[in-house]
């Protein structure tokens, strides 16, 4: 008999065919009910989609909920982080992906407690080959995902060791049937036998056979889906129907279980973005090109100009607070969530994304202008002098052109 580890979660897009404000209206109800159910049912647990930004959005509406969240996180019954937003894993710069994790982990620690240290991207549309290395950079040695797998060309196991540069690796855990494999909605509860025999048990059988596993992971959730009320009662009914053993578990616990068997798992290296079992939406690499261009230009501005200038400014006694830099990065990271970055959003949402890019560029330009002005003033430059900054980490050889404004 196979043991299926059921994890109750919700996948929460901040914006998609709906806006961020629409999502906040819904979260105001759903997240409150999640907290209420966890406090009522002390053995239940819930994963809040592995991103801190949606918790921040909720706390902005319900600041009184912070202590409730902190308590549940400390009890390891509510799981938050490690991402700030559920990132696209192909278009953003590698540094943006790392900053997404750094900010998500840091902010979770400061506001809510220990983050869920799981590389959790259940709905991202394909993954770059160096994601294992990037995850290792922040201390994460595992990865849970859905899209992009092919059991003939990549590996014949749903669980495997995924390697990146410098031989850095993560234990990779695939959802071959998506993050809704074990979904238990109110409608599913009305037709529990059909759900178990036609969806759940076949999925467990498939996962067990692909790698010869006695323990398999079954996510139980869906887009913007609420917590399963009285989940132990429902799981008891499922066990009466299923040919397998269903137990309630958490993602960190299953990762720990699998890491104990890591030496038995096959190895794989290179990207994951094949559309065999789920769409990876390859065409979104080209649609809404302006969003991707704005992301690239802003990344270059931050990484090659703003942050180097902050370091130069610090040496000159000009201190720019980390808070304003984090706010700048957050504006960018909100635009790099998988749906937002992919452009698989409505025209109404595009307006919001472009406005965030506008605000981020204003912050970046403001920091740059502030540092340049203060350095120029400290050097007592006259109106006939020009100062040029080389913010690249190497000597510049070549020509520079500039526009000069005069009174003549």
Image (spheres, helix red, strand yellow):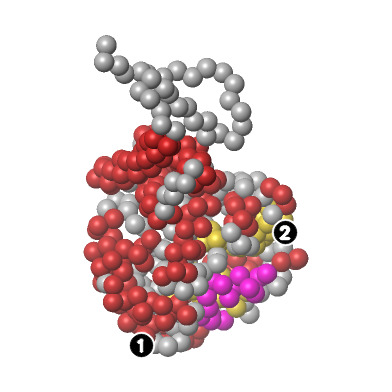
User: In the rendered image of this protein, does residue 339 appear above or below residue 11?
Assistant: above
Front position in the image: 328 or 271: 328
Q: Is residue 252 magenta?
A: yes
The 10 Å Cα crowd at callout 1, few under 14, some 14 to 19, many 20 or more, is few
Residue shown at 45% from the left, 18% from the top: 401
Label 2 residue SS? loop
Q: Which stretch did the figure color magenta?
A: 245-259
Image quarter (top left, top right, bottom left or bottom right) of the C terminus: top left
From the image, tell me which residue sits under label 1.
40
Cα distance in 3D space between marks 2 and 1: 42 Å
Residue 398 placement, left or right of 368 = right
Q: Chief secondary structure of the magenta span? A: helix
Residue 349 placement, left or right of 193 = left
Q: Is residue 125 magenta?
A: no
From the image, tell me which residue sits under label 2.
266
Q: Position of residue 244 (x, y in %)?
A: 57, 79
Residue shown at 44% from the left, 58% from the top: 84
Label 1 residue SS? helix
User: In the rendered image of this protein, does residue 178 appear above or below residue 318?
Assistant: below
Residue shown at 52% from the left, 17% from the top: 399
Residue 21 image-quadrant placement: bottom left
Farthest residue toward the right? Answer: 263
Decide if residue 350 is in sight here. no
Q: Position of residue 198 (x, y in %)?
A: 47, 69
The number of numbered discs placed on residues in the rendered structure image is 2
């Amino acid at each position: 008999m196979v043991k299926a580890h059921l994890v109750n979660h919700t996948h929460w897009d901040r914006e998609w065919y709906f806006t961020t404000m629409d999502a906040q209206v819904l979260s105001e109800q759903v997240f409150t009910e999640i907290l209420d159910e966890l406090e009522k049912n002390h053995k239940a647990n819930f994963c809040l989609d592995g991103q801190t930004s949606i918790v921040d959005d909720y706390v902005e509406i319900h600041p009184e909920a912070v202590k409730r969240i902190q308590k549940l996180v400390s009890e390891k019954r509510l799981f938050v982080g490690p991402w700030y937003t559920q990132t696209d894993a192909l278009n953003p710069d590698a540094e943006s992906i790392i900053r997404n994790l750094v900010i998500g982990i840091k902010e979770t620690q400061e506001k809510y407690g220990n983050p869920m240290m799981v590389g959790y991207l259940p709905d991202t549309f394909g993954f770059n080959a160096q994601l294992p290395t990037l995850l290792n950079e922040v201390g994460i040695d595992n990865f849970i995902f859905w899209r992009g797998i092919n059991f003939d060309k990549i590996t014949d196991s749903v669980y495997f060791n995924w390697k990146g540069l410098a031989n850095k690796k993560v234990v990779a855990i695939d959802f071959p049937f998506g993050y809704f494999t074990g979904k238990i909605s109110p409608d599913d509860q009305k037709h529990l036998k059909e759900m178990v025999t036609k969806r759940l048990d076949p999925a467990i059988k498939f996962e067990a056979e692909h790698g010869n596993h006695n323990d398999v992971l079954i996510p139980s959730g869906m887009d913007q889906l609420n917590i399963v009320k009285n989940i132990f009662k429902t799981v008891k009914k499922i066990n009466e129907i299923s040919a397998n053993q269903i137990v309630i578990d958490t993602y960190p616990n299953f990762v720990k279980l699998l890491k104990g068997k890591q030496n038995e798992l096959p190895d794989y290296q290179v990207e994951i973005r094949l559309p065999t079992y789920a769409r990876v939406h390859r065409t979104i690499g080209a649609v809404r090109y302006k969003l991707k261009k704005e992301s690239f230009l802003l990344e270059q501005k931050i990484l090659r100009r703003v942050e180097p200038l902050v370091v130069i400014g610090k040496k000159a006694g000009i201190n720019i607070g980390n808070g304003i830099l984090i706010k700048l990065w957050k504006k960018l990271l909100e635009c790099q969530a998988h749906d937002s970055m992919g452009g698989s959003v409505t025209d109404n949402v595009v307006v919001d994304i472009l406005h965030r890019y506008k605000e981020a560029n204003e912050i970046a330009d403001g920091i740059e202008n502030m540092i340049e002005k203060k350095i120029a003033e400290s050097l007592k430059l006259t109106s006939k002098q020009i100062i040029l900054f080389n913010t690249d980490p190497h000597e510049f050889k070549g020509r520079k052109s500039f526009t000069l404004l005069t009174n003549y």
